[in-house]
Image (cartoon, coloured by chain):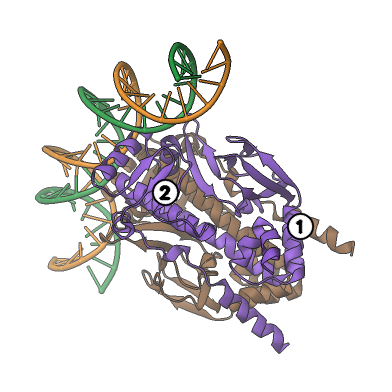
Chain colours: A brown, B purple, C orange, D green
Amino acid sequence: MHAMLDRDSCLVRNFKYYCALDETEAELLSALEKTPQTVSNAQMLWEENHPAETICVLSEGWAYSYRSMDDGTRQILNIFLPGDLIGLSDFSPRRHLTSVAMLTEGVICRFPLKNLTDIFATSPRLTTVLFSLAGHQQAIMAERLVNMGRRTAREKVAHFICEMHLRLSRTCPNTTHRFNLPLSQQVLADVLGLSAVHISRTFSELREEGLLYRERNRIEIPDLKAFYEVANFSDIYLSDSINELLKCSEKDHHLR
Amino acid sequence: MHAMLDRDSCLVRNFKYYCALDETEAELLSALEKTPQTVSNAQMLWEENHPAETICVLSEGWAYSYRSMDDGTRQILNIFLPGDLIGLSDFSPRRHLTSVAMLTEGVICRFPLKNLTDIFATSPRLTTVLFSLAGHQQAIMAERLVNMGRRTAREKVAHFICEMHLRLSRTCPNTTHRFNLPLSQQVLADVLGLSAVHISRTFSELREEGLLYRERNRIEIPDLKAFYEVANFSDIYLSDSINELLKCSEKDHHLR
DNA sequence: CGGTAATTTGACGGCCGTCAAAATAGGTGG
DNA sequence: CCACCTATTTTGACGGCCGTCAAATTACCG
């Protein structure tokens, strides 16, 4: 049993975090991850405004999506971790609204958008989970919008680190108060709408107060509780109750 | 035929903008709009962190969603127009992640979340459309993130006005270079992460340059093209091609 | 060990926030 | 139709956060 779990695709493992899957469902999902392709650091997966025939699962490594501005700057919209679906929101415009590039080397699996409508037509349960994933991503973006609009640089940095810490600790159970964050200060600046110089100053400030240590890509948070307070971080927006949802729809199913 | 269209619910009309609906589908959708309820200006529809048993369709009037900050300020996340679904992203956490309040008086129709899973189980086509709507909302938020992160106050204001103008011109075909925007400068400030004072200054600046006139809630844009340029506005992110999507899934259906 | 990328530091300036007061508009009741 | 009250908008003065530019320092990688 455990051996089988280990052989699950990354996406299936991620979904199983949300709900139990039967064999048909697991198979449908695995279909999305049949064409692994290794990609190098900084490689682009696609560019904004190009037609979106396929989107992809990120099986290994980190990636990010962004929009380029006329003046040469850019705004990063999302950071993706292993097991994430990239490009879900390009479904309707059938056009990539953002560019996507790797932050590390990794493995991705492209699949055509039609696979999604196949899932809609075949498995209401998986559809529910997909819909939840989309809502989850939107919640993250909403929280980042709050971050950008109403917080200082100090709070922005702290809040973002908290978000990544929490997301990581779900995927990798061995994440503690030390973890790896493969984002340069320039990347952090482009995520948070700040300048790289000011990111540096902010890290210095947090370091001097003993709240956060960062060297290269290594992060250490001595006192997580204190750090959450600096960030005004609340983890509610990253919570989920898909299992309750599925129970509801199943109970309903039995009645028919 | 035309008489029937006039009797359609607001949501059905909105969906028909995207794709033709057969009778079963129209009925499923109408089920979401069976319990109209008039609401007054500034009335709250729900508050953040409360359990989300129902979400709603906005049938008439304008609304907005926001998050309150500890220091008493707030960040507005979304502006809703007639025909919009409010609360879609609360589906998975089963908890309202934002507060929602009215900007004008209006009519809303609450419905339980279970209706969504019913749709998933019954109509893959409607599911596709729902998924597209969710993606559409996410695209709007992504664009606003870009706006907040990498643009000046002047550009932020102009861009937001452009977005509203475009969204309105789809719902109300009689929207021209003059239209109604029932948002106070304080509300605009809370949308754009600025202070109300600076919003006022920015409007003055745009007025003096002859680019935008605003009195009370009335907006006039003498030269739309010139104004788009101030905003660096591109309308790609608000485009849709759901019909192609549906054709794909139908073609597929016939093959079985 | 040389070359490039990433980070740090300092000086300076500008955009935008805050505070406060004045002006304007809208709404209500007499 | 006017008097009054409140919400909204405008204007000015001032300050701070953060951006820009540039140079120095450090880390990384072959």
Q: Residues within 10 Å of mark 1 (few under 14, many from 20)?
A: some
The secondary structure type at the circle numbered 1 is helix
The quadrant of the image that shows the N terminus of chain A is bottom right
x then y, percent, for residue A191: 39, 53
Mark 1 sits on what residue? B31
At a point 64% along the width and 79% down the height, the residue shown is B249
Q: Residue furthest bottom?
A: B255
Question: Is B192 drawn above or below residue A74 in the view shown?
Answer: above
In this rendered view, identify the residue nearer to me: A33 or B4. B4
Q: Residue B9 lies in what quarter of the image?
A: bottom right
Q: Is residue B223 left or right of residue A151?
A: left
Question: Is A78 drawn above or below residue D29 in the view shown?
Answer: above
Disc 2 marks which amino acid? Answer: Ile
What is the CA distance from the residue labelled 1 to the residue labelled 2? 51 Å
x then y, percent, for residue A70: 28, 61
Mark 2 sits on what residue? A219
x then y, percent, for residue D8: 43, 31
In this rendered view, identify the residue nearer to me: B13 or A207. B13
Q: Residue B163 carries which label?
A: none
* Residue B118 seen in render: yes
Disc 1 marks which amino acid? Answer: Ala
